[in-house]
Image (spheres, helix red, strand yellow):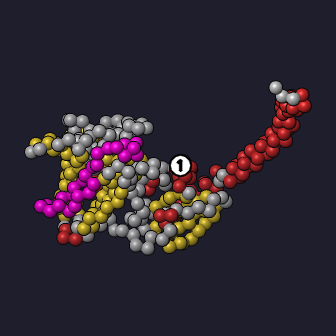
Amino acid sequence: MYPPRVALANEDLRFQTPRAWKSWAFVAVPVVGMIELGAHVAQTCSVAPERDWRAAREYVAQEAKPGDLVAFAPRWADPIGRERFGARLATVEREGRPDETRFPRAFEVAIRGAHLPELAGWRNGAARRFGAVTVTTRENPAPASVLDDLVSMVTPDRLRVSRVDGDRETECSFQRSAPSSGGLGFGPAIPGDRFTCAAGGFVATSVAADLDYRARRCIYAPPPGESASLRLRFSGVRFGHALHGHHALYVEAERDRRGAPVSITFKAGHSTLGSLVHADGDGWKGFELDTGELAGQVADLVVDIASASGDRRMYCFEADTR
């Protein structure tokens, strides 16, 4: 039992506390409202107007050549850039590029003073400002000279696909049908032009999201698993001194890091050029194999892809000779 004075003090506090909060609320609510209003003004004022994007697009459309890169900075602004520039400039080849090494020049379209880190070593050229959008021309100091790009050779006249079970090799047929979307968690989009195997699965040029959720244009070639493998035979490949490429799994298939590794082996003639392994968590992993002994020659390139399990092995790779 409280003494009378303490009980009275507690009673006063119990009844006065809500009044104290109410008095603070008259101050806090307007302050919060002003903060929100300020944030809204800052956001709306920092957004590049449509007229600035239009002017930048017209400039790039006049200046950019087909082999140039058009890229948007910062990276989170890429969807905005794609929408504003359209598919003629923000092409699949540019947006889904494996890396920047093959581009001799880049048009970096930026807002808020951002720059792409992958272009940091490139020489700065002209910079044109269109209101809130700045277009900087950058020169690649050592662009790669690509001889043949395997991604562009996924056609019935340049590629044969088969499933290999021990000594038995079953060819996968080429077909044309309507494309369909893979959907979140179900792999990349399914192109209309693809090689389909009787035991299931397909091989085609598609666009897959890597571990960083970046779009990559690559050859979708999921291994069947167990004792079977997938074989791709590219005909008439022009060889230089290197076979340069990348490989990954669709992000939803490898981000949990519980799947079986995928191996890929490249062969030409009677020689094995090299074997590589992609483990979950590697992301968009680059590789380069020495092909100096084949430099200047034209030969078939055989690619074997295998894994101990076919469960969610949504594997995709790209490679070129240079």
**Is 228 placed above or below 55 here?**
above
Residue 203 visible from this viewpoint: no
Which stretch is magenta?
A: 251-277
Residue at image coords 25%, 52%: 263
Q: Is residue 154 magenta?
A: no
Instruction: Give 312 or 7, whichever is nearer the viewer.
Output: 7
**Residue 139, percent from left and from top:** 47, 71
Is residue 253 left or right of 83 when viewed as pictured? left
Query: Label 1's element?
Result: helix
Res 264 seen here: yes
Q: Would residue 249 be found to the left or right of residue 131 on screen?
A: left
Q: Residue furthest left?
A: 167
* Residue drawn at point x = 24 percent, y = 46 percent: 307
- Look at 61% across and 54% down and name the residue there: 53
Q: Nearer the viewer, residue 225 or 78?
A: 225
Q: Position of residue 90 (x, y in %)?
A: 48, 53
